[in-house]
Amino acid sequence: MKTSLKTVILATGLSALAAGAAVAQEATFVMTARLVGAPTYNPIKATKLNTATTLIYDRLVVQDADQSFHGQLAASWEASPDGLQWTFKLKPGVKFHNGEPFNARTIEWWVPQFKGTENAFTVDAIERVEVVDDLTVRFHMKHPDPNLLFNLASSFMCVPEPKSYQALGDKFGVTEAVGTGPYKMQQFSVGQQTVLVRNDDYAWASDLSKNQGPAKFKKLTFREIAEESTAYLELKTGGADLLVNVPVDFLPRIQADKAAKLITIPGTEVVYMPINTSVEPFTDIKVREATAFAINQKEIMASLYGGVGAVADTFLISSLKEAQVDPKYKIGFDIERSKRVFEQAGWKLGSDGIRAKDGKRLEVKLWAQNGTEFKRLTEIVQAQLKAVGMRAEITILDSGTINSQYRKKTEHQLAVRSYLWTNADIVDWFFSAKRLGYPNVSMFNDPEAERLNDIAMNKSKTWDERVANFTAYHAYVLSQYPVAPIYQPVQSFAHGRKIVMPETIRGTGLYGPSMLDIAPAN
Amino acid sequence: MLPFAIRRLVLLVPVFLAVSLVIFMIIHLVPGDPLEHVIQVGSSPEQQAQMIARYGLDQPLIAQYWRWLGKVMSGDLGDAIVMRQQVSRLIAENMPHSLALGGSALLFSTIVGIVVGVLAASFRESWFDRAAMGAILLGSTLPSFWLALLMILMFAVQFEWFPVSGARSWDALVLPVLTIGIGGTALIARVTRAAMVETMSRDFVRVLHAKGVPFWRIQFRHVLQHAMMPVMAILGLRIGWILGGAVTVEYVFARPGLGSLLITALGQRDYPLVQGCLLMLAIAVMLGTLIGDLAQAALDPRLREAMATR
């Protein structure tokens, strides 16, 4: 009887240990806010992808936080001096989840698949793909495109398996997603969750990952929770092990929570105030200058963001080389300069604290999209503008409406917006005269800017040349004050006690390469 | 009964056409378009023009409507522009979740609402009546967003009885059902109570009391049957509501469903998907009303006869 009792106790203990080990093999990650709602894992046709994509698939190259490029499926690469040929050596022994080999033929098939899709621009410059040998592929370019590596590092350039891609048609990425990544897609319900299981054969990680073998967790569940409070409470109650993106409002609460740990890395977002250069009084460059220098970035960062993040004094994130413009072009708070330039422009301060010129008061419209953070930020901007004698009336519009209102071109004057991007070509996107109204909310249409844009976008042959050309273009745009830079948020992640995060998050965010280094706590 | 049902069904056809036109026009007249969620940074204006043409958004609005209506009539709700999937497939995936949540909430609010309404009417002007009606009034005025978070904080975070969110197990349904059900209970209880009180004052009830029929037998067997008429009308309307009325709750509890699908589609101005979702909801409301009318007619022979001879 004693023996059987011992056996039972031992068996129970072992079962508990086994159950614990099994739990330790699994983790639940929660995506919230803008990461919610990716409808497919088809990288070629998708216009929105989420973090799990970079665990299912690999790309030829990946980008680090310092904007350098590292091989993932590519072992090495070389561009010809004229920029018209790019030769990629591929890693040997790479296999897709279904056992099919990855080789030069895969790339030859893959590039033309983008034709006619929303992502066609990523391979627009590639004339044709030549298979040199089984593991060497050469891109023949229509024209030099030094941005090719950036495009190849995009999530939309994840490489799917050709046979299943063709066999599944529109169902690819929804019912099945076959890549070469460290995880295989087991189940996906749009807007709800994605279940991934480990690819035990994985042995071709990029050097951004410390772990060069299979992932540490056997199973990962990516849940999508749009409501930020709910996402936070899931972390707090242990229902989630990692919040892939922490909303700004929850930073103080998570910092104070002993059960959770907060990790921040430099962001890829810039919050800014476009100034509509086509409407009065902002047709006058002096008014734009005075307005831009009235924005107190440090005060905003301290009061709204608890001092976390970085001020923005150019239009680009600080880690981009093109952001390193001559300091004279940087736009930082200078209230005396703001007041002086207003005076020079003829806008005199009235007895009520609002400036006026030729009997017209300095009253403008200030737009923002809905959302607590934007509303509060816009109110601070409003107060700062009032401090220099400008009365701004706030209008809050929903995110689906505001862009169409910008397209009316002359309805708006000032706005508070943000963008997420890690390439200097965002200057072209928001300030090119080809896109007046939206996305060129500033209605910036300047011949010199267009000339510099053309050089930066079309005449650069090498990456260094492109950096120099975009730096010049960016500096010129700043010199015309179509925008007031405000703030660069950090990227924040929070995790519970069950997982251990890598010491350094490599890459431009928490994507596949760094996720490969996440481990169970015991 | 059958002629009445057929007559009501035929009447739904022009209603359906009118609803389809209103749905189509409303979403197309709201500022914004789906391409803003499809166009990538780096794409050229020419590529954007190609996209507009691909989705037929460069056609006159009336031409777009006819094309959509033609497809709908042949059973094709089209493809979602941003979601990149068949609208019918997305709706089919979300419908069971909405039915489970809305159906459970309707069942909960109906049972609790009728029981509370009957008891409140039976003990009219007592402390129970006042307390029940007061509590119900309070419950119905609480914003569902706030109530949902309160439920999570109390029953998921504090007591850890139920999961915070999701739709992965049966117990994840409890808190959302309670959140929606409380609001529905208030309406049904108030309508039941009012109808019961009105019926209780009728002569036939007095006669039953005079004959010595037991009180609760009169209440449940005779009074409640008559009082069910307005309750059935309310329930009929709520059948449509159960599919799309849980938008906030689905959002807070991170549950799939038609409501959350519609919210996503509206935010993205995904025209085919918004149209498909709204059409489903409109059909549900129309069928719910029809079922309510048929149920009333089944319960009341006078109504049945009156409608059949109209």
Image (spheres, helix red, strand yellow):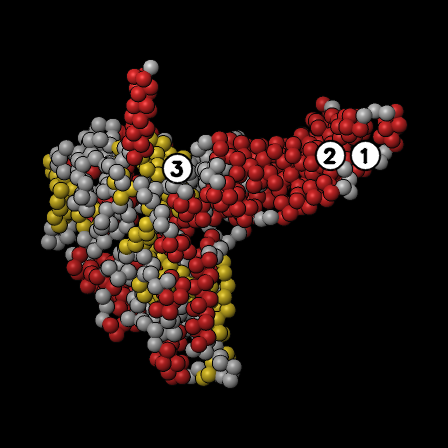
Query: Callout 3: helix, strand or loop?
Result: strand
Query: Disc 2 designates what residue?
Result: B118
Q: CA distance from mark 2 to mark 1?
A: 11 Å
Name the amino acid type tagged 2. Answer: Val
Q: Kindly report the distance in space between the C-alpha atoms of the residues bearing marks 1 and 3.
A: 51 Å
Image vertical order of residue A29 relative to residue A257, above or below:
above
Cα separation between marks 2 and 3: 43 Å
Q: Amino acid at mark 3?
A: Gln
Residue at 34% from the left image edge and 66% from the top image edge: A485
Q: Is residue A27 visible?
A: yes
**Residue sitting at 35 percent across and 36 percent down?**
A221
Left or right of A20? Residue B13 is right
Mark 2 vs mark 1: same chain? yes
Q: Closer to the camera: disc 1 or disc 3?
A: 1
Q: Residue furthest top?
A: A1
Give the camera-side residue of A71 and B137. Answer: B137
Q: Which residue is mark 3?
A: A193
Q: Can residue B282 be seen in the rendering of this structure?
A: no
